[in-house]
Structure formats: C-alpha cells, structure tokens
Image: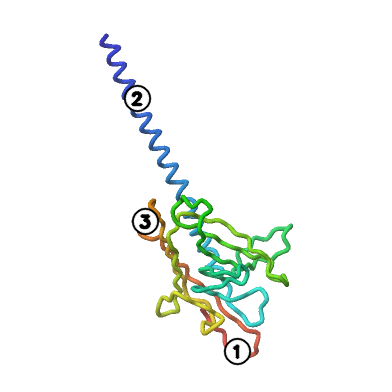
Amino acid sequence: MLAIGITAIVLVAINGIFFSAMHLRESVTEAVDGSLPVQQACDSLRRDLACAMSPTTNGVFSGDFKVGGVTSLGLNQPVDIELYTTTGALHANEPWGEVQRVTYELRLPTDRSTPGKDLIRSVTRNLLATIPPQPDDQWLMGGVESIEYSCYDGTQWRDNWDTTGSDTNLPTAVRVRIQLAGNNGGPGNGQPLEIVVPIDSQSRTNTAGAPVTGS
C-alpha cells in the first residue's frame, strides 16, 4: 500500500510537470509566432529606407521621396510614405529592374473583430508603363494602432518631407514609430516600437561643373 501511494504521488507530480511544460511550450510558440510579422515588417522598412534613391530631374527610374499627406501616384489615395528604392528582386521571368516604387499605409483589416489596423506595403515594379499599373499589395503585420514617420534634416525631426517642393534631397535619417493596438481596440500599454534608419545617398547631376550634394 505504501509503494502504491508513493507511486501515485510521483505520477501526479510528473503529470503536473508535463502539463506545465506543455503550457509553457504553447505560450512560447504563440509569442514567437506573434513576433515574426513585427520583425519582418521592421526588416522591410529598414531595407526600403536604407536603399532609397535620391530624386533626379532626368532619371526615369528614380522619383520623389514623400512623407506626410501623400497621395500615391499608383494608388491614387493617401498613404503614409512613398519612395523609390533599389530593393526589387531580379528574376529571369520578370523583365523589371531593381528599382521599384514602394508605399506604406495602414488599412482596416478584413476581419473587423481584430484590434488595430493592417500595415500594407504596396510595390510597383513596372515603372515604364504608360498607364500606371496596379501595385502589388503585401500584408506585413496586423494589430497596429498607429504609425509615425519622422525625417531628420540635419538639425531637427520633421513629420513631413516632399522632394517635389523645397526638400530637394533625401533626409539624413528616417525614424519610424509603430504603436501596437491593445486587445480592447485602443492603444496598447507598451512603448511603441521604434527604428531609426540612416540614409546615405547622394543626388548627382550630369551637368558639367555642377556641385555634388549629399543627403
């Protein structure tokens, strides 16, 4: 009887440890799965911004860099940021170069029961089309309450930038802050995710004797 009692106690202890381990595994898996879209979105933003092209007056494969109050050329609707970047993947079956137009914006999710908005990356590869083609929309992550872009001009951070106006070159750096949504649909309690991407690009001209200006 004593042996049976000890065995029962040991089995109960093993059973508790086993289910605790299973619960911990599920929690870790859920946390990892939830962090993957966030990491991929941040990596995408870093890559596009780091490879941003300077605007030129005579280049077909380069365009303007715009942040704040942007109406995208390809989408004909407001977006948060639009830029030309050299992150296009080269494939034998796709006759496009590495330069592409990219926009980022927040959209309401298809499933309205989920909190926050979806971060969408829209890409236009065919920049020589006579009629602007429909961009390729790429879902990056959901559950975003807000996203803020700030451009550094060398002395201060600004919430807008437009190379079609007085901003003739790229900002020195771009800061992105992503506030995740809480479960109740409002802002989350955590601090916003923040990435700062330095932009090292020069705007050149083929005019003889013209100075070279840096970003």
Marks 1 and 2, how far apart at CA: 78 Å
Contact, mark 3 vs mark 2 (Cβ under 8 Å): no
Q: Amino acid at mark 3?
A: Gly
Expressed as whole percent of the image width and height from the top left, the position of residue 54 reads: 57, 76
Expressed as whole percent of the image width and height from the top left, the position of residue 155 reads: 40, 80
Tag 1 residue? 210
Q: Residue 203 occupies which quadrant of the picture?
A: bottom right
Q: Earlier in the sequence, mark 3 or mark 2?
A: 2
Between circles 1 and 2, the one closer to the viewer is 2
Q: Within 10 angstroms of label 2, few (less than 14), some, or many (20 or more) residues?
A: few
Q: Earlier in the sequence, mark 1 or mark 3?
A: 3
Between circles 3 and 2, the one closer to the viewer is 3
Quadrant placement of the N terminus: top left
Taking 109 as reference, is 184 left or right? left
Expressed as whole percent of the image width and height from the top left, the position of residue 93 reads: 74, 57
Taking 125 as reference, is 191 left or right? left
Residue farthest toward the front in the current orientation of the protein? 112
Q: Residue at x 54, y 83 (%)?
A: 165
Q: Secondary structure at mark 1?
A: loop
Q: Amino acid at mark 1?
A: Ala
Of 104 and 39, which appears nearest the observer? Answer: 104
Expressed as whole percent of the image width and height from the top left, the position of residue 131 reads: 71, 70
Q: Earlier in the sequence, mark 1 or mark 2?
A: 2
Q: Secondary structure at mark 2?
A: helix
Tag 2 residue? 14
Q: How is the image coloured?
A: rainbow
